[in-house]
Image (cartoon, grey):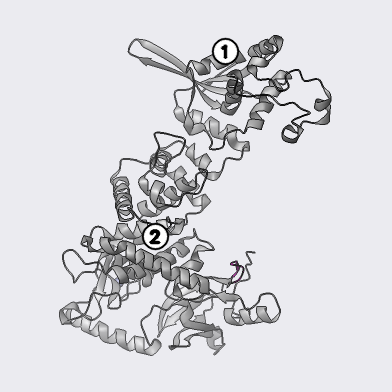
Amino acid sequence: MELISDKIKVKDILEWKKGNILRVNPEYQRGAVWKDAQQKKLVDSVMRGYPLPLIYLHHKKQTIGSITREDFEIIDGQQRINALYYFGEGAIKLFDPVKDDKEARFPQFIKDMPCPWANCNYDTLPEDLRNKFDNTEIFIVKITTHNEDEARDLFIRLQAGLPLNAQEKRDAWPGGFTEFVLKYGGKRELVRYPGHDFFRKVVLNPSGDRGEIRTLCAQIAMLFLQEATKGNWMNIGTKPVDDYYYQNLSFNIYSDSVKRFAKVLDIVVGLFNGYKGPKLKVHEAIHVVLLVDSLIDEYTPSWEKDFINAFDTFRHKSAIDKKAKDGEYWLKYGALTMTQAAGASTIQARHDFFSRKMLETLQPIKKDNNRIYGLLEREILYFQYRKQCVVCDEEIHWEDLEIHHLDEHQHGGQTTLENGVPVHKKCHPKGQAAINFLKEWKAEKEKAFTNNSTFAPDDFTVEGTTLSANNGSIKYKIESSKKGVLAVAVVNENGKLVILKGSTIASQVSDNFDANALAPSKRRKSLIEDGSIDENYTFTRDVIFNSKSNAASLVLGHSANGNFFWVPVREDIIK
Ligand SMILES: [Zn+2]
């Protein structure tokens, strides 16, 4: 990068602007523009002979055919140049420090000084003052670099002290993912980035483009491109999004997965075409896109005509449960939009609930063969069994996943969620092995469970009763008021909480389970008794939630996925 410091007269820089030699690269520009008062104050500074901050220009030379074109892109200083320009064009009338005190708010010593330019615009300015304005010299830095990224980097550093929000900073990052998000998310000020209709018309667009929609676009794209629903749920808060930009500098905007992304968005736009209901909120946008992605390949399009109805039903039931601060649509979805809404396990839990409910209503029909589970069912079962093979208990890679019909299809078993379990390809029981497996499965289930292994948080109460202290382990019961004892848990020698299904380890929940801490229900009771919280605080999946103030106040712990719910007491108070 080469720098040349220079001075230029105001009248010359305004000529450059008029002659289109000074150009704006909108990628560098922030959404917010200067208000009237800021512009007037800048010209007032010029009239007082105050120095202006440096203006940074990117000197660009382009040879087209035999003609060499030279111009400057403003890296920093656009708002200042605009203020001078509007004044030069007669569009601004300057402050009278005394009369305009309410707006101008000049210090007293300024108000005491004569101000011959008060109330003037360029044309009514006395001639000597007009000359002074025209001939004021501005310090500029001309930068020569052939690397566009270097200019962008400079912009970021110059802006470091200014209140750019997280997305505005990302917009100035070099690299393919920036281009991708601008293209699909859109940037209002830029004609060439109108954005995809999904983000323009289907999604709720907060007023004032400060980048919320582009952030959402980046978040959905991250989940989509990383195939979250196939085992890769990820956090999509500020830091992970920043990291993703950084890791994808060489992102290919023309890749097949980007084409797929566009195709899914197109389909969603089609589904919501003419939709009269409220536009999609952030969480709805995420789950709708991911769900449609799971539906489009393996099912006949029969679900499409029912989609809006199913979605409206989901919204309707969510609204009812939200009002009651109770019911599964609240506990398993609504409440999960309130806290840690961008956390991997929260998004996964919400998506699981959303997909199941949509699947129930849509009843999508498999294209070819009804004895194979569709993508959506595979995704749901994969997470329901926390990626574990029910035969060997080892983790399954998505590519190795098969779904076993417990009750075999050839014997009339249905291709339903209830009848499917995830297995490795190599573990998939066939023939006699399948019959034996079913026998064992049923026996084990009867031992520890009375129903299937998916339990909703509100299905049972967690009682941390010490049952025995043999071998240094402490046992807990996980009980359901409806279904009795569901499982037991022990704290092993290493302090890990281990949940047992029958005699098999189902999961290790926590590395730092406090065996002496009270179980959440007791903890809640004691918090109510000592006046810390009132009865309005109820349990959700991972928080105590105040139904009156709408505030999630006390994080107690969380379930690893949607299946089991066990809440070791934690003292973390977030508010
Ligand atoms: Zn296996």
Q: CA distance from mark 2 to mark 1?
A: 54 Å
Task: Left or right? Give the position of 186 relative to 382.
Answer: right
Q: Quadrant of ligand 1?
A: bottom left
Q: Quadrant of residue 359?
A: bottom left
Residue underneath mark 2: 287
* Segment tinted magenta in the rendering: 548-556
Task: Left or right? Give the position of 91 relative to 177.
Answer: right
Residue 233 in magenta stretch: no
Q: Nearer the viewer, residue 386 or 39?
A: 39
Does the image show residue 427?
Answer: no
Q: Quadrant of the C terminus?
A: bottom right
In the rendered view, would you say 361 is above or below 176?
below
Task: Left or right? Give the position of 2 relative to 316.
Answer: right
Q: Secondary structure at mark 1?
A: helix
Residue underneath mark 1: 12
The answer to whether the residues at label 2 and label 1 have Cβ atoms under 8 Å apart is no
Residue type pointed to by label 2: His
Could you tell me residue 439's position as x and y percent? 26, 87
Q: Residue at x 44, y 44 (%)?
A: 247
Could you tell me residue 58's position as x and y percent? 51, 22
Could you tell me residue 367's position as x and y percent? 18, 63
